[in-house]
Image (cartoon, rainbow, N blue to C red):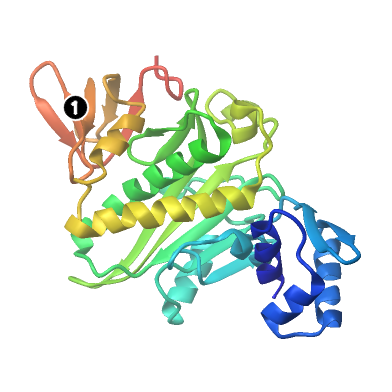
Amino acid sequence: MKAEILAMLRESDGYVSGQELCNKFGVSRTAIWKAINQLKEMGYKFEAVSNKGYHLVSAPDVMNEAEIKSLLHTEWAGQELFCFDEIDSTNTKAKELAEQGYPSGTLVVADRQIAGRGRRGRSWDSPAGIGIFMTLMLKPDINPNNASMLTLVTALATAQAISDVTGADARIKWPNDIVINGKKVCGILTEMSAQFDYINHIVIGIGINVHNESFPEEIRETASSLFLESGRHIHRADLIVRFLERFEANYAIFLQTEDLEGLMRDYNALLVNIQKQVRILDPKEPFEGKAIGITKRGELIVDTWESRKLVSSGEVSVRGIYGYV
């Protein structure tokens, strides 16, 4: 009920009477009073005026079920929600929930991860109170060969949501790093469980540096946070909800053709690599060229001095990004 009370107060321009809340939820005034007090203990501030009711003054920067659900207006993304103060890995938990039968769109959110990881087994620092660590679980009825494109769908939604909420110019370093002013602020890790021709589930983990004010010396030149790049302390739940809205819309476009044809223009518009010199760290034969954009399969188009190549895997370095000059 706390989420519903918050949603009702947020939707009102003024005050909501205790009686309105009682009628809405079919409970006593005592129950409403208890719920309001519980919210106060969580950090919410209200004005309570006789004969007027309650008015929400401010909300804390929390990522609990009541806060996220009170802001959420998606059809399916995030409607099944699990929030933790601390967890080993949101991806691990999302896999467990998938195997337990939870539906596509289930979201796992944590204030802190103690065993977070990035691509190639790299660790991802996940301190409490300053970041967003979340995993969206999907059960798409698509060809497993098309699943890798969902990483790019996620990157697009994340960059769009960050720009929407912070006003910063969030860009995508192909295929799925989010950068602002040339520094990484977000990493995305996608894992799939599939049979030969059937996907059991996909989990997409997203780690966003939000309130960080500094970084260890070894990554200071390449990593940053939304606060450092925008100068704003944002409300993390707002960003989570905006991401879910953007993802739901982009995912619907992706499902129409099971490729990125309908999203290519938006993705290329945010691609920090585009028209830039890139170095492809192909283990067989590294090469350099100019990035032109992506194909509808999500491959990076690179023009070299001898031919046009399509890159579907491997690390990409960009001049001026992450120390490649």
Position in image of residue 10 (x %, y %): 67, 57
Residue 65 is drawn in which quadrant?
Answer: bottom right
Exactly how many numbered labels are in the figure? 1
Q: What amino acid type should be assigned to the residue bearing mark 1? A: Val
Task: Let me know if residue 287 appears in the view.
Answer: no
**Callout 1: few (<14), some (14-19), or many (20+) C-alpha neighbours within 10 Å?**
many
* Residue displayed at 42% across by 78% down: 99
**Circle 1 residue:** 302
* Residue displayed at 28% across by 33% down: 268
Image quadrant occupied by the C terminus? top left
Q: Nearer the viewer, residue 65 or 293?
A: 65
* Residue displayed at 81% across by 85% down: 28
Q: Nearer the viewer, residue 42 or 211?
A: 42
Position in image of residue 323 (x %, y %): 45, 20
Image quadrant occupied by the N terminus? bottom right
Q: Residue furthest left?
A: 307
Task: Let me know if residue 298 appears in the view.
Answer: yes
Question: Secondary structure under badge 1?
Answer: strand
Residue 212 sits above or below residue 221 on the image: below
Residue 283 sits above or below residue 191 on the image: above
Residue 68 is drawn in which quadrant?
Answer: bottom right
Position in image of residue 128 (x %, y %): 71, 50
* Residue displayed at 71% across by 85% down: 26
Position in image of residue 273 (x %, y %): 32, 26
Q: Residue furthest front?
A: 51
Residue 134 sits above or below residue 174 on the image: below
